[in-house]
Amino acid sequence: MPDRVDILGVPMDCVTMSSAVEAVDTLVQGDSPRAIIAVNPEKIMKARHDANLLHAIQGAGLLIPDGIGAVIAARLLWHKRLQRVPGSELMPAICDLAQRKGYTVYLYGAAPEVNRVAEARLRSLYPNLRIVGAQDGYVPESRMDEVIEAINNSGAQILFVALGSPRQELWMGKYLHRLQVKVCQGVGGTFDVLAGKVRRAPKLFCVLNLEWLYRLLSQPARLIRQTALPLFAMRVVREKLTVLRSS
Ligand code: UDP
């Protein structure tokens, strides 16, 4: 399995898109359910103060370098030359893997209409993909046993959970051990993108690693979530200085 580094107390795997897909393939062959979690500065800062979130991250089978801030931190602190592996791009890559290998997938999360349209879109993009079930993400906690049972009865090997962060990570931390899937990826707003409800950043923003800025401009309500960024940058620089001073 890939090299794992520590960013401010939170682990992250040094993977590329292709080694991440290979790792997923290995996890699907395993015998216990494992989570795939996207690591970015916002989540790192949150995990420092949320023991349940940190626990879910620490137990994950694959921690992808999703945010550019986390990629830069890995370079600064560990001299790792990583590229971003965005969760929203890993999901289609996993669908492609699943289609090739005949793995079964289940789609849990997002609003009912979004969930339906995302499923239809996946069926047209991957005609041989075996989607064995889907459930929107607005089921009350009191009905969670039914959701778990439906996922288990579907025979899904790969579960995509689109509840947003940190809700989906906490959900995985709480329920993964009761699931019979092999892999469970937290995909945030990816169903909304698939359904055409939210647009992904134009290519230029992605190339310049400014996808976060595009999301901020198109969804200003996210500003609150981004306030952790400057603090993250300060902490990484402080940690780097501490290492330099002691060497
Ligand atoms: N969502 C859900 N159930 C909830 C709350 C949110 O299914 O109780 C879904 C919401 O409909 C959306 C996704 O979670 O599809 C959140 O997307 P967002 O872009 O906020 O996630 P991020 O990628 O930023 O974590």
Image: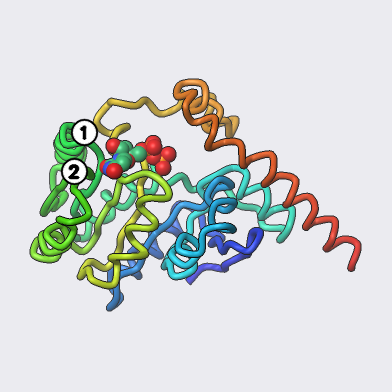
Q: How many marks?
A: 2
Q: Which mark is residue 114?
A: 1
Quarter of the picture holding the C terminus = bottom right
As helix, strand or loop, the secondary structure at mark 1 comes to: helix
Q: Residue at x 23, y 71 (%)?
A: 178
Q: Label 1, label 2: how many angstroms apart (C-alpha)?
A: 8 Å
Q: Is mark 1 within 8 Å of ligand 1?
A: yes
Residue 45 position within the rendered picture, expressed as x and y whole percent measured from the top left: 59, 51
Please state if 143 lies on the left or on the right of 30 as rendered: left
Label 2, residues with CA under 10 Å away: few <14, some 14-19, many ≥20? some
Q: Which element carries disc 2, helix, strand or loop?
A: loop
Locate ligand 1 by image quadrant: top left
Residue 110 as seen in the image, left or right of residue 190: left
Is residue 136 placed above or below 222 in the rendered structure? below
Task: Give percent across and percent down for residue 190.
Answer: 33, 39
Circles 1 and 2 in contact, beta carbons < 8 Å: yes
Q: Position of residue 198 (x, y in %)?
A: 34, 26
- Crowding at mark 1 (Cα within 10 Å: few <14, some 14-19, many 20+): many
The answer to whether residue 105 is above or below residue 11 is above
The amino acid type of the residue labelled 1 equals: Val
Q: Which mark is residue 31?
A: none
With 68 as the anchor, is 180 left or right in this view?
Answer: left
CB at mark 2 closer than 8 A to ligand 1?
Answer: yes
Frontmost of labels 1 and 2 is 2
Q: Position of residue 77 (x, y in %)?
A: 73, 58
Residue placed most toward the observer, 52 or 3: 52
Q: Which residue has dot 2 on it? A: 136
